[in-house]
């Protein structure tokens, strides 16, 4: 004879990392902004949301070249984790909302033939473009976790 026992409980886990390579994870997989956000939220906390110049520099140093999704989106330009977005370093003439569809932010790292660079500057692009992306670790909570035990 078996007996099912069910219980529900709230579990709160807080994880805090300082400025370190463990805060951000770089993925070369090509995903849309929404796919990247879903991936990050399932496996980490969210898309990367750097909150200061040290964190932006850490992102810049992590990847070699290209365009990489971060957790920045057009709704008054906000971070997806709801942190402060007041000190953003935009690429020249950005954000420009080209074609009225540039609603997601990414970080640019390019070196130009004249020796200039766009390393670590932000740009806006279509959320349906596929790019590499950064995830971040941070504070998160798991709630209403249900466990079922079967006793024999």
Image (cartoon, rainbow, N blue to C red):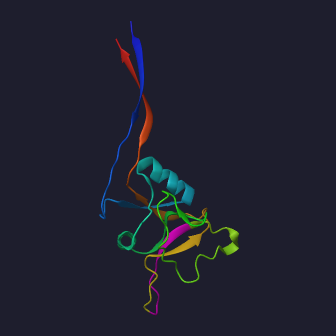
The image quadrant where one finds the C terminus is: top left
Q: Is residue 149 visible?
A: yes
Given residues 51 and 111, the one toward you in this image is 51
Q: From this viewpoint, which residue is outermost toward the bottom?
A: 114
Whether 65 is drawn above or below 147: the answer is: below
* Residue located 45% across and 47% down the image: 42
The image quadrant where one finds the N terminus is: top left
Q: Position of residue 40 (x, y in %)?
A: 45, 53
Numbered disc total: 0
Whether 61 is drawn above or below 5: the answer is: below
Whether 45 is drawn above or below 89: the answer is: above
- Is 107 a magenta residue? yes
Whether 11 is drawn above or below 68: the answer is: above
- Is 152 a magenta residue? no
Given residues 20 and 68, the one toward you in this image is 20
Q: Position of residue 77 (x, y in %)?
A: 57, 67
Quarter-of-image position of residue 143: top left
Q: From this viewpoint, which residue is outermost toward the right?
A: 99
Whether residue 138 sits left or right of residue 121 in the image: it is left
Q: Is residue 32 visible?
A: no
Magenta extent: 105-114
Q: Position of residue 70 (x, y in %)?
A: 48, 64
């Amino acid at each position: 004879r078996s007996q099912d026992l069910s219980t529900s409980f709230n579990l709160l886990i807080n994880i805090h990392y300082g400025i370190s390579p463990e805060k951000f994870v770089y993925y070369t997989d090509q995903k849309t902004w929404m796919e990247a956000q879903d991936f990050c939220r399932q496996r980490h906390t969210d898309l990367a949301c750097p909150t200061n110049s040290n964190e932006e520099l850490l992102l810049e140093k992590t990847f070699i070249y290209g365009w990489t999704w971060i957790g920045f989106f057009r709704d008054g330009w906000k971070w997806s984790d709801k942190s402060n977005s007041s000190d953003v370093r935009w690429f020249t003439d950005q954000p420009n909302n080209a074609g009225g569809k540039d609603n997601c932010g990414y970080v640019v790292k390019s070196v130009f033939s004249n020796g200039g660079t766009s390393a670590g500057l932000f740009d806006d692009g279509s959320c349906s473009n596929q790019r590499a992306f950064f995830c971040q670790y941070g504070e998160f909570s798991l709630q209403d976790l249900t466990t079922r035990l079967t006793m024999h």
